[in-house]
Image: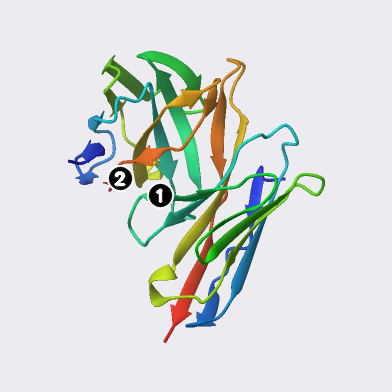
Amino acid sequence: RKEVEQDPGPFNVPEGATVAFNCTYSNSASQSFFWYRQDCRKEPKLLMSVYSSGNEDGRFTAQLNRASQYISLLIRDSKLSDSATYLCVVNGEGPDTGRRALTFGSGTRLQVQP
Amino acid sequence: DTAVSQTPKYLVTQMGNDKSIKCEQNLGHDTMYWYKQDSKKFLKIMFSYNNKELIINETVPNRFSPKSPDKAHLNLHINSLELGDSAVYFCASSQEIYRDPYEQYFGPGTRLTVT
């Protein structure tokens, strides 16, 4: 089983639509959760951290369900500029140094159409 | 004022060659990373350095050798390049908080093509 799993999409939605992505993770000891955004042929950039109580940043809402080990991202009122790949990221175990490393999902592609 | 920079941006080379990719960050972060993103878009960690000390070394062929001359630089040297090494290599940096990696800032990537 992959450490972080996402539906690759693509999700094709019209402008103004609401779209939701889910992600599941396998390491129940994970403590930190993030959504990153990656535009085509560009580097990943942090979109938002995900907190246990859920958090919102403008049109973006992130939720965490520790019992089910899944994370969601909701985008309201989609804009053309939201078209990108959204990467679900959790901290996981690196080798036995005691340090943890971020584990990235393969991403969900979103295409917002006019 | 690029936060994390990498050179070169594109690298086309033949099998068997040795090449290096350089990375520099001006954010004052303690930790730097190398990731490989393959054609399936998986972003997989290769190495992590904290204050010039290697702290993560994932299962990577020993043809790949990271070098950190100081905490602002992390270079990646690859010996005897193979076709399967073709990928985009991203450098990143972060400030660790209580031994946990926090927000990571990525460089623009180096697209390596081995022919």
Total labels drawn: 2
Give the letter of the chain under mark 1: A
What is the quadrant of residue A33 in the picture? top right
Q: Residue at x 59, y 21 (%)?
A: A95
Q: Which mark is residue B109?
A: 2
Q: Are marks 2 and 1 in contact (CB under 8 Å)?
A: no
Which residue carries the number 1 mark? A45
Residue type of the residue flagged with mark 1: Lys
From what the image shows, is residue A74 above or below residue B49? below
In the rendered image, residue B81, in percent from the top left (x then y), is placed at 32, 35
Q: Residue at x 50, y 22 (%)?
A: B56
Q: Residues within 10 Å of mark 1 (few under 14, many from 20)?
A: some
In the rendered image, residue A102, in percent from the top left (x then y), is placed at 54, 36
Residue type of the residue flagged with mark 2: Gly
2 and 1 marks on the same chain: no
Q: CA distance from mark 2 to mark 1?
A: 12 Å
Give the letter of the chain under mark 2: B
